[in-house]
Image (spheres, rainbow, N blue to C red):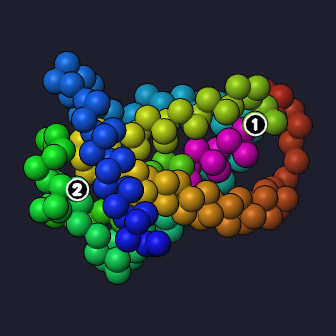
């Protein structure tokens, strides 16, 4: 059963990776770099401040920092325990995929997927009462993580597992966030006009 899933994962990676063309290589190399998403992060920070005020914004930033630390470190623990070779380092399929970035770290599961989904899931639940189209935030982890398949750095199974783990760690931090938020002093005027806080 496990061998069949692993084989399916490899074949799916080869198929999806084969859809890439040189015309789009530069785009996906740009997408896969975390720093290039800074404008999105700043916009999300603005939405948080606008809708929740500065006290809650500080709390959200602290929670996101804890969330990224937890998700990233546990992801690395899984990688070093499972020790699955990345597609470009796997001699069984390396000759069948297009790749441009090599990494000596392991593949299972994707840190790009787990971290981005954890943050997106957290911010979605924090901001959805205030922002109607908040579901759009999930385009970020989907596009961000797909870049890893395009560049043959992860298998689809690594991405899906990373998403599941990100949702799990985010759910834990949401419980903590909601508990801590109750301790903050209510300031309805600040929530209505946070710039005056």
Q: Disc 2 or disc 1, which is closer to the eye?
A: 2
Determine the secondary structure under disc 1. loop
Up the image or down, 155 lies above or below 197; here it is below
Q: Was residue 119 drawn as part of the magenta stretch in this picture?
A: yes
Mark-to-mark CA distance, 2 and 1:
37 Å
In the visual, does 4 lie left or right of 133? left
The structure residue drawn at horizontal position 43% and vertical position 35%, both measured from the top left corner, is: 143
For marks 2 and 1, the one nearer the N-term is 2
Magenta stretch: helix, strand or loop mostly? helix
Residue 50 image position (x, y, % from top left): 69, 29
Residue 21 image position (x, y, % from top left): 21, 25
Nearer to us in this view, 128 or 145: 145
Nearer to us in this view, 142 or 6: 6
The structure residue drawn at horizontal position 59% and vertical position 34%, both measured from the top left corner, is: 137
Corner quadrant of residue 74: bottom left
Q: Which residues are magenta?
A: 118-127
| Residue 87 numbered mark, or none | 2
| Residue 128 numbered mark, or none | 1
Up the image or down, 53 lies above or below 68; here it is above
């Amino acid at each position: 059963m496990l061998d069949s899933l692993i084989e399916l994962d490899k074949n799916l990676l080869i198929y999806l990776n084969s859809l890439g063309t040189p015309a789009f290589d530069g785009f996906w190399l740009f997408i896969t770099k975390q720093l290039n998403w800074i404008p999105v992060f700043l916009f999300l920070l603005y939405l948080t401040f606008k809708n929740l005020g500065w006290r809650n914004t500080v709390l959200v930033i602290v929670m996101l920092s804890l969330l990224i630390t937890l998700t990233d470190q546990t992801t690395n623990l899984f990688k070093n325990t499972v020790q699955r070779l990345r597609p470009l380092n796997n001699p069984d399929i390396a000759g069948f995929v297009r790749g441009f970035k090599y990494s000596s770290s392991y593949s299972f599961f994707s840190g790009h997927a787990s971290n981005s989904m954890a943050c997106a899931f957290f911010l979605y639940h924090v901001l959805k009462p205030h922002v109607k189209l908040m579901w759009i935030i999930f385009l970020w982890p989907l596009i961000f993580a797909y870049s890893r398949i395009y560049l043959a750095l992860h298998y689809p199974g690594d991405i899906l597992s990373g998403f599941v783990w990100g949702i799990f760690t985010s759910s834990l931090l949401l419980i903590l966030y909601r508990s801590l938020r109750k301790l903050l002093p209510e300031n309805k005027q600040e929530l209505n006009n946070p710039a005056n806080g």
